[in-house]
Image: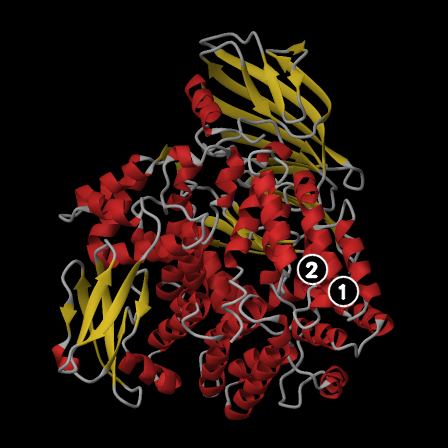
Amino acid sequence: MSLTLAEARARSTQVSDVSYDIDLDLRDHAGETFGSTTTLRFTTSAPSTFVELTDARDLAVSVDGRPVEAAYNGRRVTLERLPVGRPVEVRVEARVPYVSDGDGMHRMTDPVDGETYVSAYLSLDIAQRVFACFDQPDIKATMAVSVAADPRWQVIGNGRVTSSEAGRWVFATTPRLCPSLFVVCAGPWHSVTWEHAGLPFGWHARASLAAELDRDADELRETTNDCFDHYATLFDEPYPFDSYDQLFGPGHNWGAMETPGCVTYRDELLPRGRVTDDQRSRRATVIAHEMAHMWFGNLVTMRWWEDTWLNESFADYMGYRVAADGAGFGGTLVVHEATRKPAAYVADERRSTHPVAPAPEDVPDVDSAFTNFDSISYAKGNSCLRQLVTWLGDDDFLAGVNAHLTRHRFGNATLDDLVGALDTASPRDVRGWAEVWLRRTGFDTVVVRRRDDGVPVLVREGVRPHRFSVSALDADGVLVGTRLVDLADEEVPLPEWADLAVVPNSQGETFARLRLDDLSAATVAEHLGAVDDEVTRTVLWAHAFDEVRTGALAPAGFLDLVERHLPGEQRPALVSAVLDRALGPVLTRSTPAAEASSVVDRVAAACRSALAATDDDQVAIALTRGLAATSRDAAALLGWLEAGRTDAGVDLDPGLRWSTVARLATLGALDEAAIEAERQRDQTFAGELGAARALAARPTAEAKAAAWATMSAPDVSNRVFEACAQGLWDPERVELCTAYVDAYLADSPAICERRGQGFSLVVGRNAFPALELSPAQRRRLADTLAAGTGSGSVPTVLARLWNDQLDDLPDPARISH
């Protein structure tokens, strides 16, 4: 049972003046457990309370220096007969398990050099898997941390190291933080360090990734400095911590985590071999996103998890904005509009949708809160904030934000606090705006209607005020004009654009579905690729994505667009987004199994045509990745491996090489020995995962059985589980996977119950069968969820993800086109 809102509210009114002394012993990094000793100092207004510490061994508790027998249920240490109204000191000593699933003290041994790395990856209520604490966001405390570890190692944490002698690292005491923001990363890291703005900065990665970190060091340093300096122009509050390290860590469940003093990232963000311009831009956005959290989330923290958006929506919005305006990565908005925003529309039509800012009682416990780290809290919230800035004006927006940050520095705040600050800073009715945009689910539709005289008219179906750009296209798809409009109850005619196609929200300023009139829709279908503004073009592709999902556009019609307009597309991020959509939801959700091969072949043909038409090497890389996932020409793909490059001249970096290996395995053109030879050739952790995926992809019953056996192992790592799932599911050979769809549905609840929130995310989202489910399997999924509701037989996080998957499965009658 995770912490409930009621318990958190009661405890936060009871305890105050909290501080932690945390002493971790990581010297036995080959054993099952590490040492965790925490001294908590606090004042309480009641004689009993509890602290969390999950799965502790050899537990010993003392109060004010006297040993006590404290009740312990595997998660909570109950403290009784505490002195009331004066400071009390509680010491909790234990051995705590290392984990391989990214939730806690994650341990990984690098196959390249045999070196071990242990890192505390936390979030929500995961701090209790590392040290004893009041594990909730509104009990903030200072943290004095020391770590004993291998003397050869480097240990990085929330603050500056004040001493590091004889294998013991001592860190400066932090300002007041909530437990989820604690971090410790230990191992023989390779580091690049410098000073900027009077502070120490650093980037760190595994020793085996030293060449990659050195390759990107100048760019990473410049991006960090530029973002840091740009935030200084936006926010009145200075950066609130004493150092800024960033670390690429193995096994991370999140894309990154904003832990102050040491931001941690998935080390997939430091790829081996080539780094494309698109990858650099996306990485810069993540860097800017995490840096925004230093203010939104770390300096000012939500009171409870209903205000997750106060962290994530702001960081998502600022990440795209600052990566572009501060660090010079233009075009970041294309990624948001092409990938993340479409996912938010999907999420907002599921049964699980929730307001960007739900009521506290709608987030009754931490497991429920975990499910709200979704496309609503990130991408929709980002989109709503962008609309707020457009509607409010940047100066008033920043004035309100700065007043909010200063008023609540190192404290906790709520939606009402922020809205009050914005309302004071602006003459507009921000409270009214927040009510319809942040407190309500769903989205409006902006409709283009055509009068008899050819004049287009914009009409809103919904309740929200909108301010956005609208653009006009001539009969050849050429952009002839753009203007800003306000759309609310009154329709907006555009007489100057009579008989022209129009595109509402052409710069993506608002969050609304589009419905084009026949003239505009026909022009877009014929000339989408000719639209020369990349954001407008992206908005139109996203509109096509939405129409496939709603059934307004058949998969075959979408593939017509791909074949017609992918050749000539010069934005690599948009090429990747279109191919990801075609090989993701269109193939695995909107296409019957009997037609899956046709979709794959049409995408492969489109990639070949586009490759022949482009002279842009970045676009060619994106198209080659699509071809590597779809080609049936095994001889050509084997030739790629032999030559180390494609016949179009694209070099095979390690990631592209493993994608090619996986496709050859799917085609039955590589056996186990050949895949093992590739693994031996690679000899990295990424290579281990690539081999796991390829082995699972082989089209034999034995390969599928072996993949599921690996996934079912009790200690399988999160990364290996995900890699096997990527290979296991084959939308073109559904019959070969049927037994394992059944096994997945039967076994996943127990796996998630045992492995926790982060692993549940991998199981329920990343590993869900990517193929057409039979009617019987659909019924089984629905029945399992119905039976598990309220009974606990399906853990909360998995239940939410499975319900979302069930909602995303289309009506079988509709997908047969």
The residue under label 2 is 725
Name the image quarter holding residue 737: bottom right
Q: Secondary structure at mark 1?
A: helix
Above or below, comparing residue 168 to residue 503 in the picture: above
Q: Residue at x 27, y 76 (%)?
A: 517
Disc 1 residue type?
Ala
Residues 391 and 742: in front is 742
- How packed is label 2: few (under 14 Cα within 10 Å), some, or many (20 or more)? many
> Relative to 79, is 380 on the left or the right?
left
- Mark 1 = which residue? 696
Q: Position of residue 762 (x, y in %)?
A: 62, 52
Note whether residue 410 is visible. Answer: no
**Residue type, label 2:** Ala
**Residue 302 in the image: above or below residue 224:** above
Q: At 70% from the left edge and 27% from the top edge, which residue is drawn?
A: 56
Residue 268 position (above or below residue 633): above
Q: Earlier in the sequence, mark 1 or mark 2?
A: 1
Q: Position of residue 149 (x, y in %)?
A: 72, 39
Q: Is residue 60 above or below residue 675?
A: above
Residue 606 position within the rendered picture, expressed as x and y whole percent measured from the top left: 54, 85
The answer to which image quadrant residue 391 occupies is bottom left
Say if mark 1 contacts mark 2, CB within 8 Å.
yes
595 with respect to 97 (left or right): left
Tag 2, which secondary structure? helix
